[in-house]
Image: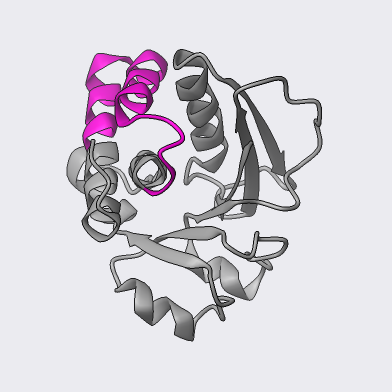
Amino acid sequence: MLQVRFHGRGGQGVVTAAELLSVAAFEEGRVAQAIPSFGSERMGAPVVAFCRIADGPIRTREPVTAPDVVVVADVTLVHHVDLLDGLAPEGAVLVNTSAPADSLHAVLPFPDGVRVHGVPATELARTHVGRPVPNAALLGGLCALTGAVSLESVASALVRRFGPVVGGANALAARGGFEAVAASTGAAA
């Protein structure tokens, strides 16, 4: 089972990202669940969401406390939230940043063995969607990083959720996120 925890701020689409990831997994015949968790429902407030993907039944229903992957939509959360709490020793972190992944070690002390990848998700969203909502680009990066779902399934989930125009623009942002991570991992679309 793959367990993913998404961290972001209200308005960055992390709850939607967890839901779309689960829909993409369903489209591929897998079992998935998405769980949102947020306190004050306002723009800019810290938000966390979870997604599990498995090939068989998922019996647990609680939030993900031991993620395999942590997706960070806003790196400034490092000062407010323990982003790496419970991360698997050989886990991965996907961060919304245009800075080189190596420079992130100055902000977050990543344990040895943890793979860190950056995606310029906000820039990709502005380019393709016209708004700074990084979730689709991060989903594309997650596809390249984990191979848990295909980029095509994520694009299909985006179009189904947002329609052909907005969903198609988000699918382009997802492809950009995929390509950004694939360049460092060797993943193929």
Residue 184 visible (yes or no): yes
Report the residue that reaches farthest toward the bottom.
106
Count of numbered marks: 0
Q: Which stretch is magenta?
A: 145-172
Q: Is residue 182 left or right of residue 45?
A: left
Residue at 47% in and 46% down? 12
Q: Image quadrant of residue 116?
A: bottom left
Query: In the figure, 156 relative to 45: above or below?
Result: above
Task: Give the residue displayed 60% in from the left and 23% down from the top.
Answer: 55
Q: Position of residue 59 (x, y in %)?
A: 80, 26
Point out residue 136 in the picture as x, y percentages from the top left corner.
Answer: 36, 38
Pick whichever, 100 or 125, lies toward us. 100
Residue 111 located within the stretch drawn in magenta:
no
Quarter placement of the N terminus: top right
Please identify the quadrant where the C terminus is shown: top left
Q: State the image coordinates of residue 39 (x, y, percent, origin top left).
A: 75, 47
Residue 184 in the image: x percent, y percent? Answer: 26, 60
Of residues 81 and 188, which is closer to you in this image? 188
Principal secondary structure, stretch drawn in magenta: helix
Q: Is residue 20 above or below residue 86?
A: above
Residue at position x 51%, y 70% from top? Answer: 76
Look at the picture and state if 53 lies above or below 11: above
Q: Is residue 43 left or right of residue 171?
A: right
Q: Is residue 72 above or below residue 179?
A: below
Q: Nearer the viewer, residue 9 or 98?
A: 98
Q: Quadrant of residue 174?
A: top left
Question: From where the camera sits, is residue 129 visible?
Answer: no
